[in-house]
Structures are given as structure tokens and as C-alpha cells.
């Protein structure tokens, strides 16, 4: 499988799960989590949804021309979803508070992704 198709697949699956997790939080977690932890979970869902769309855009651009900055953007967005959103999901639903240390690394991955995407677009 080439990377453009991989990023398209990760973006589509990420979008699916952002909707599913958002619905799960709204219905199943609303009476279980405190309002603050529910907000943490929703932040993870929001960032996952946004960056899943970004992955779809990167995958579509790579179909036209696979450039190294696009590849970096795709991997950074995918890593950011895992690290940022994943750590927030774990932080909100468990007592594993040290997961909050992981979240900024996901944020840095998102920034790297957006910077790489910008670089690719400016060079084109």
C-alpha cells in the first residue's frame, strides 16, 4: 500500500472514530466523568476530527505528487492523533495522570505536520 492510500485510510478511520468517540462521550460518559474530564475527552475528539481531515487532504495531495514534506506532514498528523488525542482519552477515563506528559508531544507533532504542509504548499 502506498503512503497516499495509507494516509487516506488513517484519515477515514480517524474520522469514523472521532464521531463514534464523540457520541460515546455524549451518551455513555456524560454521567460518569466530571465536566472537566468530559471537556478533556471532547478536546481529544475535536483534534482527532480536525487532523483526520488534514490526513485526507495530505493523502489526496500525495495522489498528485508525493513530496517529502507531504510525507512528513502525514506521519506527523497520524502521530499527533495517537499521542495528543490518545493521551487525552486515557487521561480522562483512567487514573493514569502521567499521560498528561505525553499530550504536548502530540501537539508538537501537529505543529510539525502543519509546518510541513505549509512548506510543501509554498514550494509547489
Image (cartoon, helix red, strand yellow):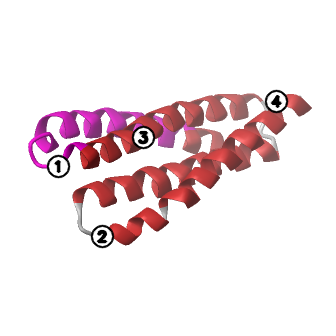
- Residue at 76% from the left image edge and 43% from the top image edge: 116
Tell me which corner region of the image, top left, top right, bottom left or bottom right, holds residue 98: bottom left
Q: Quadrant of the C terminus?
A: top right
Do labels 1 and 4 touch, CB within 8 Å? Answer: no
Tell me which corner region of the image, top left, top right, bottom left or bottom right, holds residue 90: bottom left
Dot 1: element: loop
* 116 with respect to 31 (left or right): right
Query: Percent position (x, y) of residue 87?
Result: 40, 59
Do labels 1 and 3 touch, CB within 8 Å? Answer: no
- Residue at 15% from the left image edge and 44% from the top image edge: 29
- For disc 1, the marked residue is 33
Residues at marks 2 and 1, CA–CA distance in whole angstroms? 14 Å
Q: Tell me the chief SS of the magenta region.
A: helix
Q: Earlier in the sequence, mark 4 or mark 2?
A: 2
* 19 with respect to 1 (left or right): left
For the record, the magenta segment spans 8-35
Q: Earlier in the sequence, mark 1 or mark 3?
A: 3
Compare residues 90 and 33 and report the one nearer the observer.
Answer: 33
Query: Percent position (x, y) of residue 58?
Result: 65, 34
Q: Earlier in the sequence, mark 2 or mark 1?
A: 1
Dot 2: element: loop
- Residue at 40% from the left image edge and 66% from the top image edge: 99
Query: Percent position (x, y) of residue 92?
Result: 28, 55
Does the stretch in magenta take in 47?
no
Compare residues 95 and 50 and report the one nearer the observer.
Answer: 95
Query: Percent position (x, y) of residue 13?
Result: 41, 39
- For disc 3, the marked residue is 14
Amino acid at each position: 500500500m502506498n503512503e497516499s492510500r495509507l494516509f487516506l485510510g488513517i484519515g477515514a478511520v480517524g474520522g469514523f472514530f472521532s464521531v463514534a468517540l464523540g457520541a460515546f462521550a455524549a451518551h455513555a460518559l456524560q454521567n460518569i466523568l466530571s465536566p472537566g474530564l468530559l471537556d478533556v475527552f471532547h478536546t481529544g475528539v475535536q483534534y482527532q476530527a480536525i487532523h483526520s481531515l488534514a490526513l485526507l487532504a495530505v493523502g489526496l495531495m500525495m495522489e498528485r505528487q508525493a513530496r517529502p514534506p507531504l510525507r512528513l506532514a502525514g506521519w506527523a498528523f497520524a502521530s499527533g492523533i495517537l499521542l495528543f488525542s490518545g493521551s487525552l482519552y486515557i487521561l480522562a477515563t483512567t487514573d493514569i495522570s502521567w499521560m498528561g506528559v505525553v499530550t504536548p508531544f502530540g501537539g508538537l507533532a501537529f505543529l510539525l505536520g502543519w509546518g510541513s504542509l505549509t512548506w510543501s504548499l509554498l514550494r509547489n
